[in-house]
Image: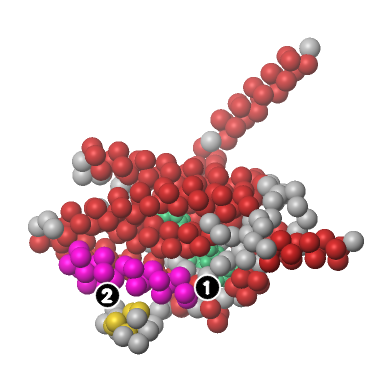
Amino acid sequence: KEKDLQKEFDAKIDAETKIEPRDWMPDAYRKNLIRQISQHAHSEVVGMLPEANWITRAPSLRRKVALLAKVQDEAGHGLYLYSATETLGAKREDTVDDLHRGKAKYSNIFNYPTVTWADIGAIGWLVDGAAIQNQVMLTRTSYGPYSRAMVRICKEESFHQRQGYEIMLTLANGTEAQKEMAQDALNRWWWPSLMMFGPSDKDSPHSQQSMAWKIKRQSNDELRQEFIDKTVPQAEYLGLTIPDPDLKWNEERESYDFGPINWDEFFNVIKGNGPMNKERLKARKDAKDNGAWVREAANAYAKKKRKREAG
Ligand code: FAQ
């Protein structure tokens, strides 16, 4: 019986038929999806913090409205993705507790500080840009609810990317000090953004199986290269310099060669030792603790209502 179910599952993967919540799936497929989607959800939620830091200090009402909307979108993405993990049988409480206990990962990128307004531009441009590169691929992922979530989320991320690029464009065409601020933000966010795609393919333990299951449709290195090729001309248009002396167009490959990535920094950050890891986790834990009374009140109200309805 199990063999038949496995065969049916394999045939669906081969035929590009989405796997749906009630379908049989191998345990390891389910586990791997819960791992990836919950980390993705945590990234969206923790990812609100660096930008939220600038909401009160946005330089104009228009900038503030756009930033508020963007940060709210990220919250929505997080909730959407937690729901996707629930379709796989994960409990949201456990998933969130794993984050708070430091057991679950979230994207390396959100462990860096946002020290100037230009960082908000750089995040939209580079971080959302990298997120789109990865998530457009995930619209074709084999698990139905995840793939459909990605279609919606990518539409919003495109707005976020343009919002960030436009901030960079304004600064890059502004005063000398503003241009310097934009360049400084690019210098600090470039390399961590490249790390968002994950370790090199040869050091990526999940890739092979995730590709076979069509959870991932392109490798970490392929996506990183595509992102670089797309982003270099955008930096040129801004008149800014990518902080990589080895960056060079390769005629033969029709693609950019680039310098070595500091993987020690990456692994250190995802182990919890980045500049902002402790502060980010504390902010999430405090948010949960400070909201405890709301959850208690909502539960008490729901209980009272059920009792009343029962008779
Ligand atoms: N950060 O074997 P692989 C956003 C971990 S976008 C931290 O290659 P996999 C939008 C990995 O989990 C950011 N950890 O793993 C936004 C694994 O550890 P584990 C979120 C990383 O899964 C924008 C180990 O290294 N996007 O939030 C990272 O096959 C602006 C080995 O790696 C997604 O999560 C990293 N960058 O490939 C929000 C996209 N990379 O679990 C607010 C969905 C790897 O064994 C503001 N995820 N690790 O302990 C994916 O596509 C994949 O999970 C990859 C990693 C490509 C990230």
Is 136 displayed left or right of 32 in the figure? Answer: left
| SS type, badge 2 | loop
Q: What residue is disc 2 on?
A: 243
> Which color scheme does this rendered protein use?
secondary structure
- Residue 156 position within the rendered picture, expressed as x and y whole percent measured from the top left: 41, 47
Q: Name the amino acid, label 2.
A: Pro
Q: Nearer the viewer, mark 2 or mark 1?
A: 1
Residue 251, compared with residue 26, is above or below; it is below
Corner quadrant of residue 255: bottom left
Can residue 272 be seen here? The reply is no
Q: Amino acid at mark 1?
A: Ser
The residue singled out by tag 1 in the image is 219
Between 36 and 296, the one nearer to me in the picture: 36
Magenta part of the protein: which range? Answer: 221-243
Residue pictured at 21% horizontal, 44% vertical: 59
Q: What label does residue 92 carry, if any?
A: none
Pick whichever of labels 2 and 1 is earlier in the sequence: 1
Where is residue 233? Give x, y as percent: 26, 69
Q: In the picture shown, does residue 292 fall above or below 304? A: below
Q: Position of residue 4 (x, y in %)?
A: 85, 63
Image: 131 above or below 298: below
* 3D distance between C-alphas at marks 2 and 1: 24 Å
Q: Secondary structure at mark 1?
A: loop
